[in-house]
Amino acid sequence: MKNALLLIAIYIVFVLPTSAQNTTKTHTVTLAINNILELDFDNSAQNLGFTFATATDFESGKTNLSAAGLRVRSNKPWTVSVKANTVNFSATAGGDANVPASSLSVRKNGTTANIALTTSDQSLATGNRGGFGVNTFSIDYLANPGYISPATYSLGVTFTVTAP
C-alpha cells in the first residue's frame, strides 16, 4: 500500500505537470495594400445649365453654386484636377464657333479661387486619405461668355484624381 501511495505521489508530482504544459505557435499575417484611388460624382442634384436672359446676365455672367458634388476614396493624400475637353464650346446651328472654354470657370464650393478652364489639368481640390464620407465636396460653375449669338453651347469638363 505504501508503494502504491508512493507511485501515486510520484505520478502527481512529476507526470501530471508535464502533461499539462502549454505549447504555443505563432502565425505571421501579412497585408498586401494596393493603391486605392476613386473619384465619383455624389448623389446630389446637378445644376449644370445656365440660361442667359437679361443684359445683366451677359455683362456680369452667372454662377451656379453647388452645381455638382464630387467624392474621393483613397488610401493616400490626393489631388482632383479639372480641365476642358476642347478649346471652345460647341454650338448648335447659328451659334458662335469661337466661344472659349475659359468662358467657364470652376471652383471648390466655399472658396474664392476661380479656375478658368483650359485643356490642361489644373488643381481644384486636395485631401487626405479616407472614404467618401470624409472626402466629399461641391463645385461651383461660373459662366461669363459675353454677348454671344443665340444658340445652345456645350463643353465637356473632365475631373481627374491623382495621388502624387
Image (spheres, grey):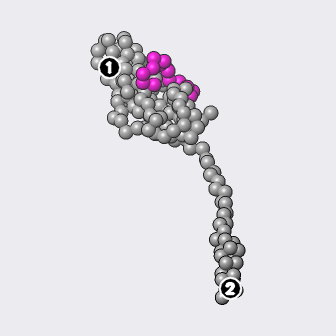
- Crowd rating for badge 1 (residues with CA inside 10 Å; few <14, some 14–19, many 20+): some
Residue 114 shown in magenta: yes
Q: In which quarter of the image is residue 2?
A: bottom right
Give the percent coordinates (x, y) of residue 32: 63, 51
Position of residue 28 in the picture relative to residue 159 (left or right):
right
Position of residue 28 in the picture relative to residue 62 (left or right):
right
Quarter of the rendering occupied by the N terminus: bottom right
Residue closest to the far left: 53
Count of numbered tags? 2
Mark linked to residue 2: 2
At a point 61% along the width and 48% down the height, the residue shown is 33
Name which residue type carries label 1.
Phe
Name which residue type carries label 2.
Lys
Where is mark 1, residue-wise?
A: 52
Residue closest to the far front: 2
Foreground residue, 59 or 147? 59
Give the percent coordinates (x, y) of residue 49: 35, 28
Residue 10, compared with residue 74, is above or below; it is: below
At a point 44% along the width and 38% down the height, the residue shown is 133
